[in-house]
Image (tube, rainbow, N blue to C red):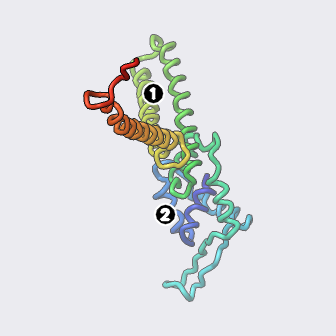
Amino acid sequence: MLELAVLALLSESPMHGYELRKRLAAVLGSFHRFSYGSLYPCLRRLQASGYVTADDVGAATRLGGRSRVVYTLTGEGKEKLAELLGEGGPSSWEDEMFGVRFAFFAKTDAAVRLRILEGRRGRLEERGEKVRSALTRTTKRLDSYTLELQRHGLESVEREVRWLSELIETERAQTPGSARGAQVLSTSSTELSTGSSTAGAGRDEAVGGPEHDDEGPGGAGPSPDS
């Protein structure tokens, strides 16, 4: 999880450790509390794997004589980031990982975004059903405070499901080839076909009108032999 966040932030620009810490706190602060002590071991692992480089900015070039290590994403790091962003399996639907993935949705392919959102919604719907079932079985055995806590948790789940449903509808509307996009195309085709049929019927009536008039009082009328 931290690996993905670090690579994603470094894809924007090279950063030194302190700046990276601030950016991580700003981006992930609402979703995940990470330990600053875990950042530098993560950076060392990424460097050992060839995903980032660590360049020491010399003291002579820094005000105050202090040197800093600047971390830069490598070509291999970009490929690793693309691989991580392309994953949309069950691990990305869980509470902690979903927040991190959502924080970097702007860098994620639309189809993967939709898969993660739908998976997350399904996971929460399952959780909600379990809470409802538990409440039905244990309501009489719970004190009022515990019961309220359970209800609050259920309301939180239902609220997030509604939010996810709105996001999913927006993604489907914007994603070519999605179910919503196919529905729009089908509706447009039906309307076009209906319009063409109506126009054709109008032309037939226009052509048939004069022929029918020939049968009228001024026309030839029926043959005397008939």
- Specify the amino acid type for callout 2: Lys
Instruction: Kindly identify which residue carries mark 2.
Output: 22
Residue 181 position in % (x across, y down): 50, 44
Nearest the camera: 14 or 160?
A: 160
Residue that protrudes farthest toward the top in the picture: 140
Q: Who's the residue at 54% across and 43% down the image?
A: 178
- Please rate how many residues cluster around mark 2, counting C-alpha atoms within 10 Å: few if below 14, some from 14 to 19, many from 20: few
Residue 83 position in % (x across, y down): 67, 56
Count every numbered label the image shows and give the total. Answer: 2
Q: Who's the residue at 32% across and 32% down the image?
A: 214
Residue 84 position in % (x across, y down): 65, 54
Instruction: Kindly identify which residue carries mark 1.
Output: 154
Give the left or right position of residue 71, taking residue 159 as reference.
Answer: right
Q: Where is 129 relative to 30, above or below?
A: above
Residue that protrudes farthest toward the bottom in the picture: 60
Dot 2 or dot 1: first in sequence order is 2
Which of the two marks, 2 or 1, is nearer to us in this view? Answer: 1
